[in-house]
Amino acid sequence: MISTKDHILLPDTNKLRSICKAISVLDAILSQEWEYRYYSYNNKWSDHEEFFEMRDGSGDQMLVLFAQNDCVINGFAHEYKQQDKQKLSENLPSIFNEFIFGEPVNSIGTTFCLWTTEQKNWHTGKLENVDDNSEEMLNIFDGDPQTYIDWATEYFEESYKESGIPLETVKKIYASQILTKKMVLSIVDEVEDWEQLEADLNEIGYPYNFD
Protein backbone atom coordinates (compact mmCIF):
# COMPACT_ATOMS: atom_id res chain seq x y z
CA MET A 1 0.00 0.00 0.00
CA ILE A 2 1.29 3.45 -0.93
CA SER A 3 2.01 5.84 1.95
CA THR A 4 4.59 8.39 3.03
CA LYS A 5 6.56 5.51 4.52
CA ASP A 6 6.29 3.50 1.28
CA HIS A 7 6.48 6.41 -1.17
CA ILE A 8 8.81 4.41 -3.40
CA LEU A 9 5.60 2.77 -4.70
CA LEU A 10 4.32 6.03 -6.16
CA PRO A 11 4.45 6.20 -9.98
CA ASP A 12 6.66 8.74 -11.77
CA THR A 13 5.31 12.20 -12.56
CA ASN A 14 3.97 11.41 -16.03
CA LYS A 15 2.20 8.25 -14.88
CA LEU A 16 0.78 10.04 -11.85
CA ARG A 17 -0.53 12.85 -14.06
CA SER A 18 -2.21 10.30 -16.30
CA ILE A 19 -3.89 8.58 -13.33
CA CYS A 20 -5.05 11.92 -11.90
CA LYS A 21 -6.64 12.86 -15.22
CA ALA A 22 -8.28 9.44 -15.61
CA ILE A 23 -9.97 9.43 -12.21
CA SER A 24 -11.06 13.05 -12.68
CA VAL A 25 -12.66 12.13 -16.03
CA LEU A 26 -14.48 9.24 -14.38
CA ASP A 27 -15.71 11.50 -11.57
CA ALA A 28 -16.94 14.03 -14.15
CA ILE A 29 -18.94 11.30 -15.88
CA LEU A 30 -20.40 9.95 -12.64
CA SER A 31 -21.24 13.38 -11.23
CA GLN A 32 -22.03 16.37 -13.43
CA GLU A 33 -22.27 18.44 -10.25
CA TRP A 34 -18.67 19.51 -9.50
CA GLU A 35 -19.35 19.96 -5.79
CA TYR A 36 -20.14 16.26 -5.38
CA ARG A 37 -16.99 15.02 -7.09
CA TYR A 38 -14.11 13.58 -5.14
CA TYR A 39 -11.40 14.14 -7.75
CA SER A 40 -10.89 17.08 -10.11
CA TYR A 41 -8.14 18.29 -12.43
CA ASN A 42 -7.20 21.62 -14.01
CA ASN A 43 -4.63 21.43 -16.79
CA LYS A 44 -4.31 25.23 -16.97
CA TRP A 45 -3.71 26.08 -13.31
CA SER A 46 -1.07 28.51 -14.59
CA ASP A 47 1.05 28.87 -17.73
CA HIS A 48 3.31 25.95 -16.83
CA GLU A 49 1.45 24.21 -14.01
CA GLU A 50 -1.39 21.70 -13.71
CA PHE A 51 -3.40 20.98 -10.57
CA PHE A 52 -5.21 17.96 -9.12
CA GLU A 53 -7.46 17.98 -6.07
CA MET A 54 -9.05 15.36 -3.87
CA ARG A 55 -11.68 16.44 -1.34
CA ASP A 56 -13.95 14.13 0.60
CA GLY A 57 -16.49 16.72 1.76
CA SER A 58 -15.65 16.08 5.41
CA GLY A 59 -12.45 18.12 5.66
CA ASP A 60 -9.80 15.87 4.14
CA GLN A 61 -8.03 17.20 1.06
CA MET A 62 -5.09 16.33 -1.16
CA LEU A 63 -3.61 18.85 -3.58
CA VAL A 64 -1.12 17.90 -6.28
CA LEU A 65 0.83 20.42 -8.36
CA PHE A 66 2.45 19.35 -11.62
CA ALA A 67 5.17 21.71 -12.83
CA GLN A 68 6.52 20.24 -16.08
CA ASN A 69 8.64 17.26 -14.92
CA ASP A 70 8.32 18.09 -11.22
CA CYS A 71 5.47 17.32 -8.82
CA VAL A 72 4.51 18.00 -5.20
CA ILE A 73 1.70 16.46 -3.12
CA ASN A 74 0.13 18.11 -0.07
CA GLY A 75 -2.19 16.01 2.06
CA PHE A 76 -4.41 17.11 4.91
CA ALA A 77 -6.36 14.72 7.13
CA HIS A 78 -8.47 16.78 9.49
CA GLU A 79 -8.73 14.12 12.22
CA TYR A 80 -4.97 13.60 12.41
CA LYS A 81 -2.32 15.59 14.25
CA GLN A 82 -0.47 18.11 12.12
CA GLN A 83 3.28 17.75 12.36
CA ASP A 84 5.76 20.62 12.12
CA LYS A 85 5.37 21.80 8.51
CA GLN A 86 9.00 22.90 8.34
CA LYS A 87 10.09 19.37 9.19
CA LEU A 88 7.57 17.77 6.81
CA SER A 89 8.94 19.90 3.99
CA GLU A 90 12.63 19.76 4.90
CA ASN A 91 14.77 19.88 1.71
CA LEU A 92 11.70 20.78 -0.36
CA PRO A 93 12.91 22.28 -3.69
CA SER A 94 12.40 26.05 -3.72
CA ILE A 95 10.19 25.82 -6.82
CA PHE A 96 7.47 24.37 -4.58
CA ASN A 97 7.70 26.92 -1.75
CA GLU A 98 5.00 29.22 -3.11
CA PHE A 99 2.57 26.32 -3.45
CA ILE A 100 3.24 24.60 -0.11
CA PHE A 101 3.51 27.77 1.98
CA GLY A 102 1.03 29.90 0.03
CA GLU A 103 -2.69 29.62 -0.65
CA PRO A 104 -4.79 27.54 -0.70
CA VAL A 105 -2.44 25.01 0.97
CA ASN A 106 -1.61 27.26 3.90
CA SER A 107 -5.28 27.66 4.89
CA ILE A 108 -6.08 23.98 4.35
CA GLY A 109 -3.19 22.56 6.37
CA THR A 110 -0.59 19.84 5.92
CA THR A 111 -0.32 16.39 7.48
CA PHE A 112 1.97 14.99 4.80
CA CYS A 113 4.07 16.32 1.93
CA LEU A 114 5.80 14.47 -0.90
CA TRP A 115 7.66 15.68 -3.96
CA THR A 116 9.60 14.47 -6.95
CA THR A 117 11.90 16.16 -9.43
CA GLU A 118 13.41 15.26 -12.78
CA GLN A 119 15.45 12.63 -10.96
CA LYS A 120 12.15 10.73 -10.69
CA ASN A 121 12.70 9.80 -7.02
CA TRP A 122 10.02 10.65 -4.47
CA HIS A 123 11.02 12.47 -1.28
CA THR A 124 9.46 13.52 1.97
CA GLY A 125 10.75 15.52 4.91
CA LYS A 126 11.20 14.29 8.47
CA LEU A 127 8.35 12.02 9.55
CA GLU A 128 7.39 11.62 13.18
CA ASN A 129 6.20 8.17 14.23
CA VAL A 130 2.54 8.97 13.73
CA ASP A 131 -0.20 7.97 11.32
CA ASP A 132 -0.87 10.67 8.72
CA ASN A 133 -3.68 8.94 6.76
CA SER A 134 -1.52 9.11 3.64
CA GLU A 135 -2.23 5.48 2.77
CA GLU A 136 -5.96 6.21 2.57
CA MET A 137 -5.39 9.09 0.16
CA LEU A 138 -2.44 7.87 -1.90
CA ASN A 139 -3.52 4.31 -2.65
CA ILE A 140 -5.71 5.49 -5.56
CA PHE A 141 -2.41 6.13 -7.37
CA ASP A 142 -1.54 2.43 -7.61
CA GLY A 143 -2.46 2.50 -11.31
CA ASP A 144 -5.01 -0.31 -11.04
CA PRO A 145 -8.40 0.56 -12.64
CA GLN A 146 -10.09 -1.87 -10.25
CA THR A 147 -8.95 0.26 -7.31
CA TYR A 148 -11.01 3.16 -8.66
CA ILE A 149 -13.99 0.95 -9.43
CA ASP A 150 -14.02 -0.51 -5.92
CA TRP A 151 -13.96 2.97 -4.41
CA ALA A 152 -16.42 4.63 -6.83
CA THR A 153 -18.95 1.78 -6.58
CA GLU A 154 -19.50 2.77 -2.97
CA TYR A 155 -18.99 6.54 -3.24
CA PHE A 156 -21.20 7.10 -6.31
CA GLU A 157 -23.86 4.59 -5.34
CA GLU A 158 -26.76 4.56 -7.87
CA SER A 159 -25.02 7.08 -10.18
CA TYR A 160 -23.83 4.40 -12.61
CA LYS A 161 -25.58 1.75 -14.66
CA GLU A 162 -27.24 -1.10 -12.80
CA SER A 163 -24.70 -3.49 -14.28
CA GLY A 164 -21.91 -1.60 -12.51
CA ILE A 165 -18.91 0.43 -13.61
CA PRO A 166 -17.34 -1.53 -16.49
CA LEU A 167 -13.69 -2.47 -16.02
CA GLU A 168 -13.04 -2.43 -19.77
CA THR A 169 -14.07 1.22 -20.08
CA VAL A 170 -12.09 2.27 -17.02
CA LYS A 171 -9.03 0.52 -18.44
CA LYS A 172 -9.39 2.53 -21.66
CA ILE A 173 -9.62 5.80 -19.73
CA TYR A 174 -6.59 4.84 -17.61
CA ALA A 175 -4.79 4.23 -20.91
CA SER A 176 -5.76 7.77 -22.08
CA GLN A 177 -7.79 6.51 -25.04
CA ILE A 178 -10.06 9.04 -26.76
CA LEU A 179 -13.36 9.21 -24.85
CA THR A 180 -16.47 8.49 -26.92
CA LYS A 181 -20.19 8.72 -26.19
CA LYS A 182 -20.32 4.93 -26.26
CA MET A 183 -17.70 4.75 -23.51
CA VAL A 184 -19.52 7.34 -21.42
CA LEU A 185 -22.87 5.56 -21.82
CA SER A 186 -21.31 2.27 -20.78
CA ILE A 187 -20.85 3.88 -17.34
CA VAL A 188 -24.04 5.94 -16.92
CA ASP A 189 -27.54 5.60 -18.38
CA GLU A 190 -27.64 9.20 -19.57
CA VAL A 191 -25.79 12.51 -19.51
CA GLU A 192 -27.96 15.54 -18.79
CA ASP A 193 -25.52 18.08 -20.23
CA TRP A 194 -22.99 16.93 -22.84
CA GLU A 195 -21.66 20.48 -23.24
CA GLN A 196 -20.83 20.58 -19.54
CA LEU A 197 -18.99 17.26 -19.83
CA GLU A 198 -17.03 18.64 -22.79
CA ALA A 199 -16.10 21.71 -20.73
CA ASP A 200 -14.95 19.44 -17.89
CA LEU A 201 -12.85 17.34 -20.27
CA ASN A 202 -11.27 20.47 -21.73
CA GLU A 203 -10.37 21.67 -18.24
CA ILE A 204 -8.88 18.27 -17.43
CA GLY A 205 -7.07 18.16 -20.76
CA TYR A 206 -8.42 14.78 -21.79
CA PRO A 207 -9.10 13.83 -25.45
CA TYR A 208 -12.67 13.08 -26.56
CA ASN A 209 -14.80 12.72 -29.69
CA PHE A 210 -18.57 12.88 -29.20
CA ASP A 211 -19.49 13.05 -32.90
Image (cartoon, grey):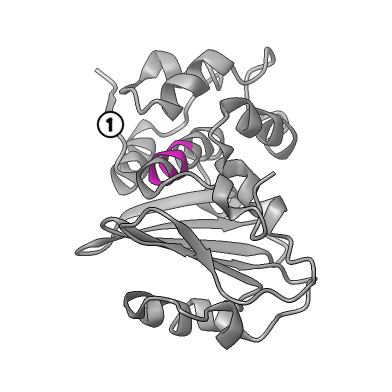
Q: Position of residue 191 (x, y in %)?
A: 47, 27
Residue 81 lies within the magenta run: no
Look at the magenta stretch and give its main secondary structure. Answer: helix
Q: Secondary structure at mark 1?
A: loop
Residue drawn 77% across the image and 78% down it: 81
Q: Position of residue 36 (x, y in %)?
A: 60, 50
Examine the rendering and report whether any part of residue 181 can be seen. yes
Residue 73 seen in render: no
Three-letter code, disc 1: Pro
Q: Which residue is mark 1?
A: 207
| Residue 207 drawn at (x, y percent) | 28, 31
Q: Is residue 4 left or right of residue 33?
A: right
Up-down relation of residue 61 to residue 106 (above or below): above
Taking the image as shown, residue 200 lies to the left or right of residue 20, namely: left
Could you tell me which residue is drawn at 32 percent across and 76 percent down?
A: 95
Please tell me which residue is depicted at 71% across the width and 80% down the height of the picture. 82
In the image, what residue occupies the spot 47% across and 50% down?
Answer: 40
Relative to residue 162, is residue 48 drawn left or right? left
Residue 102: image x %, image y %? 43, 84
Residue furthest left in the image: 47
Q: Nearer the viewer, residue 105 or 120?
A: 120
- Position of residue 45 relative to residue 162, above or below, is below
Quadrant assignment for the C terminus: top left
The segment highlighted magenta reads: 16-22
Number of callouts: 1
